[in-house]
Image (cartoon, rainbow, N blue to C red):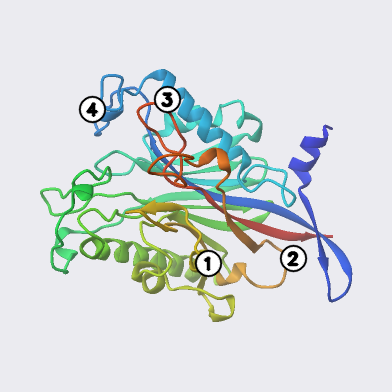
Amino acid sequence: MKIRNFFTLLLFLSLTISASAQTKKFAVHTVAFYNFENLFDTINDSRINDEEWLPNGAQNWTSKKYKQKIHNLARVINEIGTGGENKNSPTFVGGAEIENRGVLEDLIKDPQLINSDYGIVHFDSPDHRGIDVALLYQKKHFQPTSYINIPLLIYKKDTKTKDEKETEEDKADKDKIEVSKDNRVYTRDVLLVTGLLDGDEINVMVNHWPSRSGGEKKSSPFREAAGRLNRKIMDSIYKVNPNAKIISMGDLNDGTYNKSVKEGVGAKLKKEEVERFGVYNPFEEMARKGNSSLFYRDAGDIFDQIMVSETLIEKDYSSFRYWKAGIYNKPFMITTTGQYKGYPLRHGNNEVGFSDHFPVYIYLIKEVK
């Protein structure tokens, strides 16, 4: 067996337990989320608004550019969370801004990812741009037992704040909120996947909450509704299994401090604050320290978050538990010159970049006897 395959299959992490001066071995898995930013193919789909991302569209989106985008994203995914703790690419990758299943098939077939043998869970969402969320998973470690897309039902009348003045940036917003004739705001569904991670049951939710188009305050009720839906899904899972392990990840279009996260989901800053059936958000402390997964209106923030249930922060490592979190922002993914120096390196007129978001990740660990 090759050394690389040995690490991929076993993934042992040695941790020193100072109290007993004992060295224990742990299996480790990386759970990641990445907003792929406009992962569109070059084929016109009459059912969605993809005209901008065609060879004759505003982005002049050619096959060559599309293939480069796929290659760039594959490079990042392959490297997220790798290092001393884990030699393997992420076991789970939640993704957003995905046009269809086909682009995901192209992504996982890239030479950088093909040996990871990713499976795909994807549904088409009713979003007006035709962008969806999805979950990639390594088949050798995770076996889905059920999956469902859960609609976020929100309506224009739900915005009770006074209208804010729309800026030029709002008008040009790629994710501008649109309202249908029935007053519903069609946005991304929540994806819920349940399955076995090396024998342990895990529930994974993938989100892409409504944008801030039209102003943060005006659009906040939509994201607050998304937070409440996450909480409702969690409560439903707990009714079936009070000991369920739940991970909720996504581009929330809100910071860790916003009402949608703090009150809607009920996420806590510190582990000791988390009560039974509660939620811990490791990215809140990271945000307080000035870390960012994106820049919004010239200010850094963490809209990309991974939250874990109380059952994943227990200290019994006989099954998988949360260990630590990070933001993957290597130099090759960062703009080095000009007005946007330090920002994520995204697609431009003369360069096919990566994304306008940095991916985020957590580690799950389990003691191996």
Residue 139 position by quadrant: top right
Which amino acid type is marked by label 1?
Lys
Viewer-side label of 3, 4? 3
Element type at mark 3: helix
Compare marks 3 and 4 and give the one earlier in the sequence: 4
User: Is tag 2's residue or tag 4's residue first in the polypeptide sequence?
Assistant: 4
Q: Which residue position holds label 1?
A: 289
Residue 227 percent coordinates (x, y) = 36, 65
Q: Which residue is labeled 4 in the image? A: 46
Q: Quadrant of the C terminus?
A: bottom right
User: Secondary structure beneath disc 1?
Assistant: loop
Estimate the spatial distance between the alpha carbons at disc 3 and disc 4, rounded to whole Å. 19 Å
Dot 1 crowding, Cα within 10 Å, few <14, some 14–19, many 20+: few
User: Dot 2 surroundings within 10 Å: few (below 14), some, or many (20 or more)?
Assistant: few
Mark 4 surroundings: few (<14), some (14-19) or many (≥20) residues within 10 A: few
Q: Is residue 361 left or right of residue 171?
A: right
Q: Earlier in the sequence, mark 1 or mark 2?
A: 1
Q: Earlier in the sequence, mark 4 or mark 1?
A: 4
**Residue to which mark 3 is pinned:** 66
Residue 271 vs 10, above or below: the answer is below
**Residue drawn 61% across and 25% down?**
111
Answer above or below: position of 161 versus 197: below
- Judge whether 55 appears above or below 301 on screen: above
How far separated are the C-alphas under marks 2 and 4? 51 Å
Q: How far apart in space, not on screen, are marks 1 and 3 (Cα)?
A: 36 Å
What amino acid is labelled 3 in the image? Tyr
Q: Are marks 1 and 3 in contact (CB under 8 Å)?
A: no
Q: Which residue reaches farthest left? A: 181
